[in-house]
Image: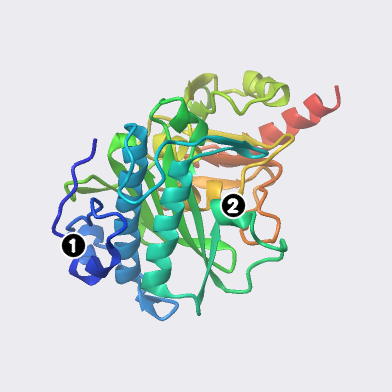
């Protein structure tokens, strides 16, 4: 269980409200001391430092809400019990909805709705059309990545918050609550991991460069026969299973793994699965592309990320993409 600092960052004290009085913001050092890099001065006319501080605080607050449900308790003012509902795209719980409400409420309170759009997994279904959001700046939110792992108590769930500009991530946060870690990155500013006591550490992917030494991180459950055939024929046969995309990318940036492959079948991962983890990885020195090596694009209307997506430590990214395309062509020709 995380321990939260009750003395919050002064610029965001107004974000904690009566609805979740147990949620507190973390006291943090000035970003200039933490990052030691030159960040863009502003994002959409607002201080990048301020946006990142607010987003990190919201990430920690949402993580506490998820952990409260995970412990079998109920946050103050929220719906009691998980109330699991099975849907077409997987289960939804009261924890998803409570964290989603908290994140959206805090973001819109802090940044308004004039410049920024908001795309959330839990609110997307209510949209009347699949047209792209008109705003250049779009928040993409997954309040609970790895809901099945959350329900099954594996501990391998996460939450994602990404700010994108014209379809590309610019500032992102991924929290793995049971690890007690918040990962964050800004475009051109590097990637970092923060713990509840405020300790912040730069992230770099591994330098493992022999294909046979690369470790592949994969899902325990989201694997069909086509994907299993691909895994068996890859040159890298060291494989570990981790739940949630956020957790998988955390494994790569912490050098426990080197490669992650997503292969859509009857369904596909969504924008909110990939946008936040992508920037964490690339700012830590890795690469994340489609198998044809084109960059991922978000806010296209269709939130599905179809096809083969490959994330790696960058050492053999082109070779991995080429190999995956060749193997899939042979598998599909059978």
Of 122 and 168, nearer the camera is: 122
- Residue 319: tell me if it is visible: no
Q: Which residue is mark 2?
A: 271
**In the displayed image of the protein, which residue is found farthest to the right?**
333
Q: Residue at x 46, y 53 (%)?
A: 100
N-terminal-most mark, 2 or 1: 1
Query: What is the C-alpha distance between the residues marked 2 and 1?
Result: 32 Å
- On screen, residue 208 above or below 66: above
What kind of element bears circle 2? helix
Q: Which residue is mark 1?
A: 33
**Within-10-Å neighbours for mark 1: few <14, some 14–19, many 20+:** few
Q: Are marks 2 and 1 in contact (CB under 8 Å)?
A: no
Q: Residue at x 44, y 61 (%)?
A: 104
132 sits left or right of 330 in the view:
left
Please identify, in this view, whether the residue under mark 2 or under mark 1 is nearer the observer: 2
What color scheme is it?
rainbow
- On screen, residue 138 above or below 281: below
User: Residue 168: x, y in percent?
Assistant: 55, 62
What kind of element bears circle 1? helix
User: Residue 297: x, y in percent?
Assistant: 63, 57
- On screen, residue 176 above or below 55: above
227 sits left or right of 49 in the view:
right
Q: Residue at x 72, y 35 (%)?
A: 325
Q: Image quadrant of residue 233?
A: top right
Q: Residue at x 24, y 35 (%)?
A: 1
Of 198 and 69, nearer the camera is: 69
């Amino acid at each position: 269980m995380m321990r939260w600092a009750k003395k919050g960052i002064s610029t965001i004290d107004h974000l904690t409200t009566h609805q979740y009085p147990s949620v507190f913001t973390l006291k943090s050092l000035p970003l200039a001391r933490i990052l030691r890099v030159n960040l863009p001065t502003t994002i959409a006319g607002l201080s990048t430092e301020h946006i990142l501080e607010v987003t990190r605080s919201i990430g920690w607050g949402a993580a506490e809400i998820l952990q409260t449900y995970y412990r079998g308790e109920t946050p103050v003012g929220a719906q009691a019990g998980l109330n699991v509902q099975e849907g077409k795209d997987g289960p939804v719980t009261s924890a998803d909805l409570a964290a989603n409400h908290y994140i959206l409420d805090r973001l819109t309170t802090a940044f308004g709705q004039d410049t920024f759009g908001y795309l959330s997994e839990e609110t997307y279904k209510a949209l009347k059309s699949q047209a792209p959001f008109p705003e250049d700046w779009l928040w993409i939110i997954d309040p609970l990545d790895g809901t099945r792992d959350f329900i099954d108590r594996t501990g391998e769930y996460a939450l994602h918050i990404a700010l994108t500009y014209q379809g590309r991530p610019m500032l992102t946060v991924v929290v793995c609550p049971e690890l007690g870690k918040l990962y964050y990155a800004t475009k051109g500013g590097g990637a970092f991991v923060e713990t509840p006591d405020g300790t912040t550490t730069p992230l770099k992917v591994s330098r493992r460069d022999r294909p046979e030494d690369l470790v592949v991180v994969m899902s325990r459950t989201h694997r069909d026969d086509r994907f299993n055939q691909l895994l068996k024929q890859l040159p890298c046969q060291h494989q570990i299973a981790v739940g949630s995309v956020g957790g998988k990318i955390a494994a790569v940036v912490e050098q426990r793994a080197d490669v992650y492959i997503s292969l859509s079948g009857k369904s596909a991962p969504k924008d909110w699965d990939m946008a936040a983890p992508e920037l964490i990885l690339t700012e830590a020195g890795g690469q994340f592309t489609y198998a044809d090596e084109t960059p991922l694009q978000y806010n296209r209307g269709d939130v599905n990320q179809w096809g083969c997506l490959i994330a790696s430590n960058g050492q053999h990214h082109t070779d991995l993409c080429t190999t995956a395309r060749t193997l899939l062509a042979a598998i599909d020709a059978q």
